[in-house]
Amino acid sequence: MVYIYSPAVGRAPAQVMPVHVGSDQPGLAEAMRRLARLHDLGLGVRRDPAKAAMWRARAAR
């Protein structure tokens, strides 16, 4: 299991999210979707809908 850390920014709290990663990396797409969500909400990063869309597109590949 791998953890993604998102530091606190402004009033958004820091978050740690577990992502399961195996030999074929099934957790990679999940990590990309979660990263997209952080960009959508501006949690730990600046809110950026364009980056969120890019991460969702990469996760769908």
Image: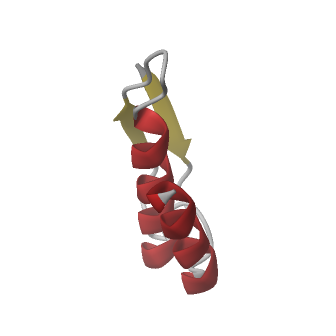
Question: Which is more toward the observer, 52 or 13?
Answer: 52
Q: Residue at left 44%, top 24%?
A: 21
Question: Which is more toward the observer, 46 or 53?
Answer: 53
**Quadrant assignment, res 48:** bottom right
- Decide: is 13 above or below 37: above
- Decide: is 56 above or below 61: below
Q: Residue furthest bottom?
A: 49
Q: Residue at left 50%, top 52%?
A: 32
- Decide: is 37 above or below 15: below
Q: Residue at left 53%, top 77%?
A: 53
Report if residue 15 is visible in the image. no
Q: Residue at left 45%, top 47%?
A: 29
**Quarter of the figure with the N terminus:** top left
- Decide: is 34 above or below 24: below
Report if residue 24 is visible in the image. yes
Question: Which is more toward the observer, 41 or 60?
Answer: 60
Q: Residue furthest front?
A: 61
Question: Which is more toward the observer, 14 or 40?
Answer: 40
User: Where is residue 12 shown, x and y percent of the image?
Assistant: 44, 66
